[in-house]
Image: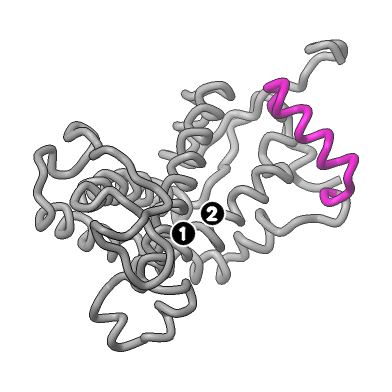
């Protein structure tokens, strides 16, 4: 029996390290700013293409109306201001990820909390987690202190695929980086392809963010938010036998 399994329900325990909490809130601010300023930039040409080129007379794979001012930065259309907001917070976003990943390797957060255990990858275990999420049956007792397999998969996907993908496609769209590292643009199939992937990944990240907020609200927002501010989390009581139809 592990130390976590011996923790009594109702106990107040340290759940999140300081590095995780800082990165979480820096990310929340950066992602919101980048998304809103990115929509402001997108409004300058609200069409997406594949390949190296895209202009008014080319056929886009996606064409949208301009996003309303209330969801963009700045609120009124200004391509130059949107770019300034975007580039400033892109640096914060990228360096925060770099520092977080280095520190997580040092303190073993990735190997300890995010690495899959063999039994978690068994089909019956994955299916049970899917059913529990569909029924909104959140972990209780000591199990609430560990990430389940769906949480691990989503966090790994965000940290190692979505966020790096957004960063590198953003770099691939930069004329300066295109001149210095032309191979980066070609990896994504051209500047317009990089722009399209950047757009898709950005909305995927926002989708994750919205689902994350919903799960926090359903799991108990006071306890969840407190743990991400102070680090302290109250262990939920064990589910009674027969509860939720079990």
Q: Is residue 87 left or right of residue 18?
A: left
Q: CA distance from mark 2 to mark 1?
A: 6 Å
Seen from the viewer's position, the closer of residues 220 and 27 is: 27
Which numbered disc, 2 or 1, marks the residue that appears first in the sequence?
A: 2
Residue name at image x 57 percent, y 69 percent? 105
Query: Which residue is located at x 34 percent, y 45 percent?
Result: 63
Q: Main secondary structure of the magenta part?
A: helix
Tell me where the magenta segment starts and ends, as one range: 120-138
Farthest residue in the front direction?
Answer: 57
Kindly identify which numbered label has been placed on residue 163: 1
Q: Residues within 10 Å of mark 2 (few under 14, many from 20)?
A: some
Does dot 1 land on a helix, a strand or a loop? helix
Comparing 29 with 235, the one in front is 29
Residue situated in front as seen by the camera: 143 or 118? 118
Dot 2 lies on which element? helix
Tell me the tag on residue 222.
none
- Count of numbered tags: 2
Quadrant in the picture for residue 70: top left
The residue at 59%/37% (across/down) is 13
Residue for badge 2: 158
**Picture quarter containing residue 86?**
bottom left
């Amino acid at each position: 029996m592990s130390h976590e399994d011996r923790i009594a329900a109702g106990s107040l325990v340290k759940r999140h390290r300081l590095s995780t909490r800082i990165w979480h809130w820096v990310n929340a601010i950066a992602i919101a700013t980048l998304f809103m300023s990115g929509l402001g930039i997108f409004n300058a040409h609200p069409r997406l293409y594949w390949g190296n080129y895209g202009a008014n007379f080319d056929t886009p794979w996606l064409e949208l109306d301009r996003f309303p001012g209330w969801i963009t930065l700045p609120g009124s259309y200004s391509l130059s201001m949107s770019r300034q907001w975007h580039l400033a917070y892109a640096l914060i976003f990228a360096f925060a990820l770099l520092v977080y990943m280095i520190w997580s390797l040092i303190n073993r957060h990735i190997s300890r909390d995010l690495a899959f255990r063999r039994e978690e990858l068994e089909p019956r275990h994955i299916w049970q987690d899917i059913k529990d999420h569909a029924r909104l049956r959140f972990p209780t007792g000591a199990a609430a202190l560990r990430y389940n397999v769906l949480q691990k998969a989503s966090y790994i996907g965000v940290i190692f695929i979505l966020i790096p993908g957004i960063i590198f496609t953003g770099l691939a769209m930069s004329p300066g980086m295109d001149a210095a590292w032309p191979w980066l643009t070609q990896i994504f199939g051209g500047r317009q392809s990089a722009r399209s992937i950047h757009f898709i990944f950005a909305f995927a990240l926002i989708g994750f963010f919205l689902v994350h907020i919903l799960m926090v609200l359903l799991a108990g927002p006071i306890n969840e938010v407190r743990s991400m501010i102070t680090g302290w989390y109250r262990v939920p009581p064990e589910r009674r036998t027969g509860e939720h139809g079990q």
